[in-house]
Image (cartoon, grey):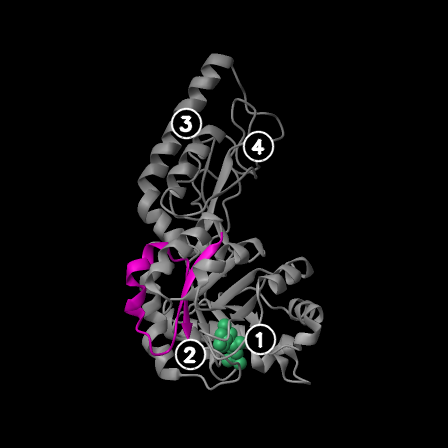
Amino acid sequence: MAGGRARVAVSILDADLSNMAYAVRRAEREGADRLHIDVMDGHFVPNLTFGPRMIKGIRPRTELPLDAHLMITDPLKYIEEYIDAGCDSITFHVEVEAKQIEPALRAIRKAGLAAGLAVKPKTPLSALQPYRKLLDIVLVMTVEPGFGGQEFMRDVAAEKLLAAREYLSHKPVGAEVHVDGGINRETAEFVGGLGVDILVVGSVLWIPGRNMGREIRLVRALADEGYQYRLNHGTPPIPRDKMVTFTQLPKDLAWKFMREIEAGGIPVLPLRGSGRFNPDGIRDYDLLVPASAEELTVERHAADRQRYLEEAERWREAYAAEHGWAEPNGLQPLADRASAADGCGSGGVGEGGSTPEPPALPPGRE
Ligand code: DX5
Ligand code: ZN
């Protein structure tokens, strides 16, 4: 997994279609983050490409996530076939018949896949409004759909990319804005500066003699640079998959707190790491949250964290009083680090006893 924030979805539209297995292997080897599969039905767009059987064939050939971009008139009719084909996300167009949209989005989500709507250049983003709560992905087309190798529409990107984020505000973590059409080393910085998460890159990667890996790395780096200097006040972006420790608690309390945090759409990873030993002989669990959602987690749950830490302390004392207990020999760290702050500000691990190494602080948070 690449560092940084931006991710590249390699569109296979302009690969050598007579050798798809090779194209897929090559994209993976050259560092693609995803594959973007352009499905066209010769009706919604004036071009015809792959169907679900092609996707099914690709699935076992790569471990990369598969993003299907359906440029078809009747997504609802075929949605189950695309779900069964092994896609990780399915995005279709908001310009299709309105009555198909909600049921198709619901079917995709019910299957546990990410659901998206794409907007053609001339369609206003407001067309997404009725479906916003059902969206994991908004795909902004910066060329007319149908063919690779067209010229990037800068004005469309400027108008829609930042604004697209608004339609995903219900999903604090994991929602994605994709940009599709005319993305290359000339346009990557511009769209990165508009906060896009996934850059779909097609034709430029398949030019004979082109170093695909270098092109992918350039596009990612330039997009991150755009993000850093246009949106993020010069601070380098947080890698998408970076996690930070929010708190450390005995298992039962950790599990309870985790469920409360996750109810608000923030994923939590419980890890039994270097936390202190409890009187029942089980170490505290670390609760990790995505670094990109750290501020939000603190905003929502700092007071709860304090409450849980106090409850943990009471539980330890009560347990020790009932069962008798002393800190296990040799398990105590050398220094007492009880006063050290953890990765999310205050709310470390309480007084005395064996305290763990404080988690690494993200840049700029000391
Ligand atoms: C066009 C497709 C794109 C296409 C992009 O309808 O949706 O995914 O592959 O190709 P480039 O990068 O050449 O614009
Ligand atoms: Zn596409």
Q: Which residues are magenta?
A: 113-142
**Cβ atoms at labels 4 and 1 below 8 Å apart:** no
Residue, disc 1: 13
Q: Residues within 10 Å of mark 2 (few under 14, many from 20)?
A: many
Looking at the image, tell me whether mark 4 or mark 2 is earlier in sequence order. Answer: 2
Q: Earlier in the sequence, mark 3 or mark 2?
A: 2
Q: Nearer the viewer, mark 3 or mark 1?
A: 1
CB of mark 3 near ligand 2 (< 8 Å): no
Amino acid of disc 2: Thr
86 or 242, nearer to the observer: 86
Q: Is residue 15 left or right of residue 6?
A: right
Q: Nearer the viewer, mark 3 or mark 2?
A: 2
Judging depth in this view, the residue of 109 and 164 nearest the camera is 109
The correct choice, above or below, for 102 with respect to 311 in the image is below
How far apart are the two marked residues, 4 and 1, measured between alpha carbons?
58 Å
Q: Is mark 1 within 8 Å of ligand 1?
A: yes
Q: Please state which of residues 218 and 133 is positioned toward the viewer in this rendering.
A: 133
When asked about the image quadrant of residue 261, the answer is: top left
Residue type marked 1: Leu
Measured Cα–Cα span from mark 3 to mark 4: 17 Å
In x, y percent, where is residue 231?
A: 37, 71
Q: Which residue is mark 2?
A: 142
- Front disc: 4 or 2: 2
In the image, is residue 72 part of the stretch drawn in magenta? no
Tell whether 179 sits left or right of 127. right
Q: Find numbered disc 2 in the image and state the secondary structure of the residue it sits on.
A: loop
- What number is the disc on residue 313? 3
Q: Earlier in the sequence, mark 3 or mark 1?
A: 1
